[in-house]
Image (cartoon, rainbow, N blue to C red):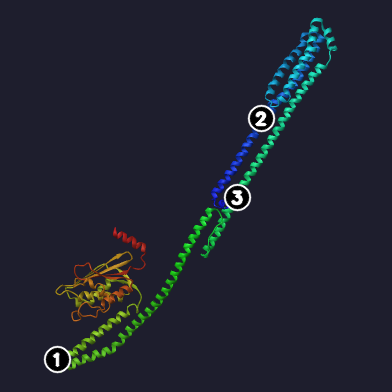
Amino acid sequence: MSLLELRTWTLRRRVVALCLAAGLLLSMLGGFALIAAASSNDHMDVILDVTGPMRVAGESLNTAVVDQETGIRGFAISGNEDNLRPYADGVARQNQLLDELDRLSQRSERQDAGIGPALRQVRQRADAWRLAVADPVINAVRTQGPEAGQALVEAASTREFDALRASIADLQGQILVIRTSAADAAKRSGTVLVALEVFAAVVVILAGATLLLLLDRLVTRPVTELAEQVREVARGDYDRSITSEGSPELRGLAADVDGMRTQIAAELTEVREARQQIEWVNEQLKAQAEELTRSNRDLEQFAYVASHDLQEPLRKVASFCQLLQRRYAGQMDERADQYIGFAVDGAQRMQRLINDLLAFSRIGRLTAGFTDVDLDAVLARVRSQFEDRAGDDAQFVWSDLPTVEGEEPLLTTLFVNLIGNALKFRRPDVAPVITVTAERDEQEWRINVRDNGIGIEAEFADKVFVIFQRLHARDAYEGTGIGLAIVKKIVEYHGGRIWLDLDVAEGTSIYFTLPLLAGVPVRELVEDAKGGAT
């Protein structure tokens, strides 16, 4: 496998491969450790369960042989059969021990190394000693008396007994060889186990170190570098490319983050360009607004000055025309009187037009500040102004109108124009009925002024609020055509809206809005509105 292919491995795959390799190696070490432990247990079994009892049996065998020799000597001296009992017990004990040694030697893997021949040699030499010494002495004592037995004992050689003792010593030497060999093997097994444990610890340490190295090189350092790159981008370096040299997952994450950075940078560039355009447009609009404000101010000043300055010459023209009319009326022909009448009427209409234009230009320019205005009181004063013009049959209907914030003179002018129009455009032979109502709509008052006059066609709904717009001939209805324009400007100056209600069967219905009374929290207004709706 090439290094390039290895770089394409994911972190998970690398960790799994490392764990599998470490696990396989540890499994092999565990297998070897099991074998070594089993071997060590076998050797310990030999030491504890075989050579230990064999050594004890060897010592006991030597004692049994000595007991036989002592019993023979005692029997030869005394001739008493009771003194022969140690000999009989020693023979039985000897045979028992030899059988036990033979059984134990079957469990020793080194029995062919000398245990078997040594046992056979002990049996042979024990039999030879009994045939050469023990049996003849016993027979002599029993047949000839103790003196004969003592003579045989004294005359007998110790060579057979010494050979028997030597064979027992050789047997014990073979047992010691087996024990030493088992102990050495057990030590070697223990050394192997320790070596395997050390090697396993080394494998675990190496695997842990390798895992830490992988995490450091593929996760920790790349994540730290990636975070530093992201922080640089967050500080404003949007042209900084984000890359990673870590695992494929981190490289993929870095690519995704860099893609997001690229998209954000592109969108940010668009936003900057759009903001520059908006700022440029705002600057242009600001300049235009300032220019428009200056122009409107100049126009208002011009209208005010023009209307004010036109008052004096217009008054002179009107005065002299009226003097001509009074002094020369009837002295000239009828056409001259008609011309003088036209001049007087034109001068008067011009004077009214200039006064209305002056009033329109003053709205918002000359202000005394907003105060609490009781609309019931305003309507009462307006009605008193129109008592003569309205006649006895006219009806003014209103009740419980609100108190609003505004300029009382302007609001009075508003109702004067609306009610004046209602009286002006009344239907012939029909008593005028003018109704004023108000209702609260969340954060504003919605006020309606309705009459039963001739009404306004829907096609003129927007035109009626334009300055100097007339819907009827000048000789049909008097006026300058500026009244509703003044009304609209007063409403907008107070922060409201005005519109013509087209859903009426007869007459004219005009709605306008005014702000609520100051100081009433919005929450209470909303709750009151909900309570009213309930």
Q: Which quadrant of the figure has residue 279?
A: bottom left
Tag 2's secondary structure?
helix
Q: Residue 496, image x and y in percent?
A: 32, 70
When the figure is inspected, residue 346 is found, relative to residue 455, above or below; the finding is below
Residue closest to the eye, 300 or 93: 93
Q: Choose mark 3 or mark 1, whichever is in front.
A: 3
The residue shown at (51%, 56%) is 253
Q: Amino acid at mark 1?
A: Glu
Upstream in sequence: badge 2 or badge 1: 2
The residue shown at (25%, 83%) is 352
Task: Give the distance between the C-alpha atoms of the residues marked 2 and 1, in whole angstroms.
Answer: 159 Å
Which mark is on residue 358?
none
When the figure is inspected, residue 375 is found, relative to residue 294, above or below; the finding is above
Q: Residue 281, image x and y in percent?
A: 41, 73
Q: Residue 437, image x and y in percent?
A: 25, 68
**Which residue was labeled with disc 3?**
212
Which mark is on residue 42?
2
The residue shown at (75%, 24%) is 172
Is residue 33 among what the camera can see? yes
Q: Residue 506, image x and y in percent?
A: 19, 69
Upstream in sequence: badge 2 or badge 3: 2
Tag 1's secondary structure?
helix
Q: Choose mark 2 or mark 1, whichever is in front.
A: 2
Number of residues whose C-alpha sits closer than 10 Å to that of mark 2, classed few (under 14), some (14–19) or many (20 or more): some
Q: Which quadrant of the figure has residue 270?
A: bottom left
Q: Amino acid at mark 2?
A: Asp
Task: Give the distance between the C-alpha atoms of the residues marked 3 and 1, in whole angstroms.
Answer: 122 Å
